[in-house]
Image (cartoon, helix red, strand yellow):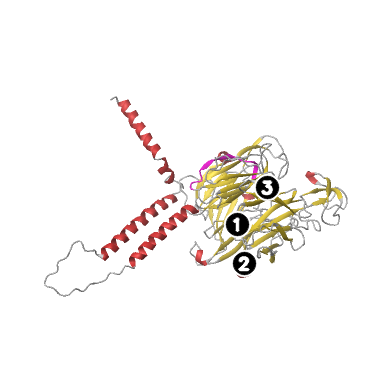
Amino acid sequence: MKLSSAILALSTTLAAAMNNQKDAFHYNRPGMLNGPNMWVFGGQGMRIYSPDGTQRKVTTSANEICHNVTGYRGGEFELSCAFYDIVSDGKKFVWSAVSRGVSKIDVFDIDTGATVGSFETCMTPRDIEYHPLRNEIWVRCMATSDPFGGYMDVFSADSPGSDSSVSINLTGNHSLSAYGFSVIDNSLGDVGYATVWNKPALFKIDLSSRKVLSNHTLPAAYGGYEVAYSRLNRHIFVRASVCCTCGFEGADLGEDCGRYGSSNVTITTGPAAGEVLEGQCGRCDGLANVDSLGVYEFDTATDKIVGNHVMPDGTGGDPFGSPDGRHIVLVGRNGGEVIRILKAGVNGERSTVAIDLELGFSTVDEETSVVYNDFAFIQTAVDDDIMNTGKARDLIVIASGTENKVAFIDITDDKNVVTIVTLSNSNVMTAKKNRRQVEWCVGTPYVWVDGASADEMYILNIDTKQMVTTITGINSKKMISVENYAAKRTADLIAQQMMAAVTDTDQVEVKSVNPAPVAVQNKDDSDIDPVGIAALVIGVCALVVGVANMVYMGRSKSSSEGGTDESVDQKTLGSKNLA
């Protein structure tokens, strides 16, 4: 055989062998992430960090995952990295709504951060919800992508590329925009709910037929927008919007109606209630005696409103719910002077005010601004504390949009103890547009707070209430704590079974037999030696545990060899068919 032919045959054989090992390589590939990590999305793309921020594990450029769109008011194409919402399914993928004016969502591999692809959905996705029981990802969009499209879409969490037909019409006119949010949760079973900013109703959705079942009126409202959901009492908290006057002397908004102009609108609240006057709707938040509906509390068991909630000054506030559903935080247009925390009650009863909290942050020149738009709720019990500190935690972390400070609020046993920590000693405000992102790296003692205006990220220890790390040169829009909980649970179950086997073996009693004296004792080689059996079982268990740990820990090999361009400073201070 010629040498060239031999080489060709050998290379073909090796290629076939490598191709046959793709499945093995996939689950043992380098750069596998282990445990909780912080995924940060922004104008530079996506980066994945260790919980304390000292190690950057993955870098994906903006060109790979952002989308080219026309400018907000037309013009040239530009790369949009807005990242409106990010969710993890905890087992396979991380899902992101990236850009305005694009009918796509991006999907990433949960184990490596690798880009899986961009998948078609409805136009301008803004809100994403994961439904674990149905194994579905629900997407809430601002517009339809075609004349027959809908404002919501659904993906199989296992197969983002599969095809299905979804057309959930929330407006009655597919050409209209439908800004709003959705509530999708295991505790609601086969239904979900959605709001539309200019529709005074809460829409009930059948998740199986993917149709609107009913809509429930929000009295006197122009529309519904932000929502929070309590799993504790199964109530939805809906921010109601209203109409107000502008364009004339003595109007609610003054003589200038601003960029959005004016039209004849029906006023439903305040001194001019019942009149048709020049004004605008949906942009009247925080106006005294006008924004008086606040937040409606809706009982999903009876589909009825059980009450409404306002800020201490009588105006409305945006609702934010805690993961366990015990608390709802209301944030008004008061420059952050005070927040109202509601305590969820029993199903069917109106929630009560737990506390009105003044954090003492500056409100200078921001007296009518919303300066909080994100919170971290940290809730751990002693017996489920995966940080092994033996501590129970019940904290709310709020970052100021008017100062370079963050507040830790300990609400354990209604103590409501506030600790203020300085994020930066700079005289320049590091918050962008009075807003900050706050995210707890779940399962660790670290909470992340961004300083997007200065391209900085601050990592703090939640127990010591001290700065741990400052990352510079990082542009952030959204961040999320991600861990492969399915892989973790599998490893935990293996370890538990092995420990149980070892424990059972340790309890085997080796009994000593005292035979009667004889002149000669014949020993049968087939006798069973309990000690030997016990040793054998322990050895096998140890071998299995070792192999399991080796496979699982192999996932933690990070691709840290890649360079980083930011400095780390250590401080004391639609349409898919479901399979």
Return the residue found at the far left: 519
**Residue 124 falls within the magenta-colored stretch:** yes
Q: For mark 3, does the 10 Å Cα neighbourhood hold few (<14), some (14 to 19), or many (20 or more) residues? A: some
Q: Given this view, does label 2 or label 3 mark the residue nearer the observer?
A: 3
Judged left or right of residue 353, residue 266 is: right
Q: Nearer the viewer, residue 275 or 218?
A: 218
Task: Tell me residue 429's x, y (percent).
Answer: 66, 53
Which SS type dominates the magenta stretch? strand
The label shown at residue 115 is: none
**443 to the left or right of 511:** right
- Point 39% across, 38% down: residue: 20
Q: Please tell me the numbered disc located at residue 411.
A: 2
Task: Check disc 3 and report the residue beneath it.
Answer: 212
Verify CB contact (< 8 Å) between mark 2 and mark 3.
Answer: no
Gap in angstroms between the C-alphas marked 2 and 3 = 39 Å
Name the amino acid, label 3.
Val
Categorize mark 1 by other alpha carbons within 10 Å: few (<14), some (14-19), many (20+).
Answer: some
State the residue lying farthest toward the top: 2
**Res. 355 in view:** no
Name the residue that disc number 1 marks.
187
Classify residue 107 as left or right of residue 368. left
**SS for tag 2?**
loop
Disc on the earlier residue, 2 or 3: 3
Q: Nearer the viewer, residue 360 or 166?
A: 166
Relative height, residue 362 to residue 166 (above, below): below
Q: Position of residue 501 (x, y in %)?
A: 36, 62
Q: Which residues are magenta?
A: 111-125
